[in-house]
Amino acid sequence: MPNPPHTVSSPAGLTHADALRLLKETGERLELALELAQMGTWDLDVTCNRLQASAQAAFLHGMDAQPFDDDAEQFFGRLPIEERHRMREAYRAAIENCDDYLQLIYRFQLKNGTSRLLESRARIYRDDQGQLSRLAGTLMDITQKRAQAALEASEEKFAKAFHSSPDSITITEIESGRYVEVNDGFCRLTGFSAQEVVGRTAHEIGIWTDTQQREFMVDELRQKGRVHHREMSGRDKNGDPLVLDISVDFITLNDTACLLMNARDIGQLKNAQAQIHHLAYHDPLTGLPNRALLMDRLSQQLSLLQHQNLRGALLFLDLDHFKHINDSLGHPVGDSVLNVVAARLEASVRQEDTVARLGGDEFVVLICGLDGSLDEVTHKVRVLSDNLRDLLAEPMFLDGHRLQVTPSIGIVLIPDDGLTPADLLKRADIALYRAKDSGRNTAQFFHSSMQQAVSQRLRLENDLRLALARNEFHLHFQAQVDCRTNQITGAEALLRWQHPEYGLLPPDQFVQILEESGMILEVGSRILDDACKIGGLLLSQGLVSKDRFLMGVNISPRQFRQSDFVERVEHSLKQHQLPATMLKLEITEGIVIQNLDDTILKMRSLRDLGVGFAMDDFGTGYSSLTYLKRLPVDTLKIDQSFVQDATSDPNDAEIIRAIVAMAQSLNLHVIAEGVETPEQLAFLERVGCYNYQGYLFSEPLPGPQFESLLQLRRPAQATASQD
């Protein structure tokens, strides 16, 4: 049966009018919900690009709050180009991915310069062929929502930063000064708990050393807007001092003006900075002023003395043979000696004077404000230097050792000997060099002639460098003889310098400069190599026998200390085919005492190869007897200083007797140096020393002349060999 006209069939039995009414009510409720949510709607017909939008959607896009029904370009055309580009890309991606829904957030610029952040959510509709036909969705202003979220996130970050910061952070009311909140960093720094300080003022809990510090800080904050890295002093809960780096900003909390203060403990930093500053101007071992502080004080004194028409003095001290103490007893004992010296020097001068350590065993004493004539001041300074030498020479008892040190002193007068700190220190150093060269434990005043001597030394050093390049160094050989047979048993290779201006120079005029400049390493290597070369040639020519001839070569301390010295010797021997048993290295006490264990190790390695050792200048050093038993030495050489006066000085004669007797008891050979007269040789024979070298038999000869000497002696040598 057909339905009655004008009726609607529904499960609920509603009439058509009821359905329309319900539909209208539902629409009104939807519009109300959208209005209350401030949400707009829109519907885009893609086929004709026509857009229908609600009044709220139009309003959100900066239009009049009226429904929109027009070309979509009119609606979206007011978007910034970059936003439209992003929107198209989002649509394209959704279509390509066959998405059913689309969500897009974009920013819309209003005419008044502000902007809105809009969120659009849409349903994508397609026709029967799957082509895009329609987009419909909502539009909502999320500007405040995002701002609120950002604010909440910022507050959360602030809270996390506030409570997790290792620094002390506090919030205090500006007017009352009461603490509103403190973090754990504040509690760790001050020792107070949050409960003990919140609601109270810094004045009440006694944090600030100076209660006016806060008022000054607030005034500066109001003038400049912020205070950063202000150093302030405070106290912790126990009353211990705090040095703080403070930064302060204004902050509003619950409509109350507050101060946000960040405080960092810089006490350790300040102490470290003070220590660094102290180390920059003081010697770390003795605590004395160092070179930098000395030069500063010297500069000040130059100006002051000239203004007051007074004089001063600079005493440059160097401890004699201090290196022997370090090498034999160790650096800890050496450091103790330096501290004793520093204390004695400080105790011997006035408070206004300066004692400085420049490094190593070098000290400087700066004396100020001396009045009187030049002679009177010179006398005062001389008396002071004598007192210093006597004071430093007093025995020290350190680590079970009784030690004595003496200083060499170079002295300049201020301003007579220089008008700049650099000149004064340089000239004091020149005077010191002269004092050391004069036998040590002396004091020398600077004189202009010393400058000339230094200039000559510098010139000589430059000439030595040229001599290396020009091969101006040569070896001369002095025969060593057995007086019982009058046969040559060996030779000592002696260095000579053929100077282009001064002629042939002996080593005592330049070896010290070679040693001090380091050139001795290259020169020493050449000497060793040339001596082995000559020895090999003499052997190959049949002029010497490998069993009856020794080639003596002097070795310098720096040369011996080379880590590869043993290898260098072995290389020269092999290169020139000289048997190791024909080489005798002559060493001095200076080599022995510097590093005894290393010396013994190298000597044993060379002895295992067959190389022999002679102790040169034996008897002139205080420690030779001490080390002799431990060293693989087979020969002692009696210094020529004893031989020269052996026939006239009973003391020298007795020393030679003692050396010979000791050598015999230790089964060592003995060679006397510098034998020039028959009387000297006769004395040596009487005491049992049969081997010698000196002008009595032959002066040092160049290689070819020494070969000629061997040629002349060859028949006698052969006869002696047969006997």
Image (tube, rainbow, N blue to C red):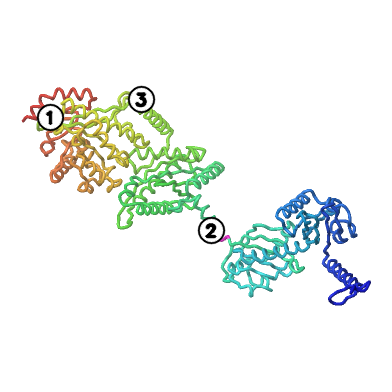
Q: Secondary structure at mark 2?
A: helix
Specify the amino acid type for callout 3.
Answer: Arg
Image-based side of 483 in relation to 334, left or right: left
Specify the amino acid type for callout 1.
Answer: Gln
As rendered, which of 518 and 10 lies closer to the eye?
Answer: 10
> Which residue position is annotated with label 1?
487
> Which residue position is annotated with label 3?
470
Give residue 37's quadrant in the image: bottom right
Q: Spatial distance from mark 2 to mark 1, Cα to Cα?
A: 77 Å
Q: Secondary structure at mark 3?
A: helix
Residue 594 location (% of width, % of height): 30, 45
Image-based side of 665 in relation to 497, left or right: left
Give residue 648's quadrant in the image: top left
Q: Residues within 10 Å of mark 1 (few under 14, many from 20)?
A: many
The question of residue 214 being in magenta is answered with no
Residue 383 location (% of width, % of height): 40, 46
Mostly what secondary structure, the magenta segment? Answer: helix
As rendered, which of 616 and 13 lies closer to the eye?
Answer: 13
Q: Residue at x 22, y 25 (%)?
A: 701
Disc count in the image?
3
Classify 323 as above or below 637: below
> Which residue position is annotated with label 2?
271
3 or 1: tag closer to the N-terminus: 3
Q: Are marks 2 and 1 in contact (CB under 8 Å)?
A: no
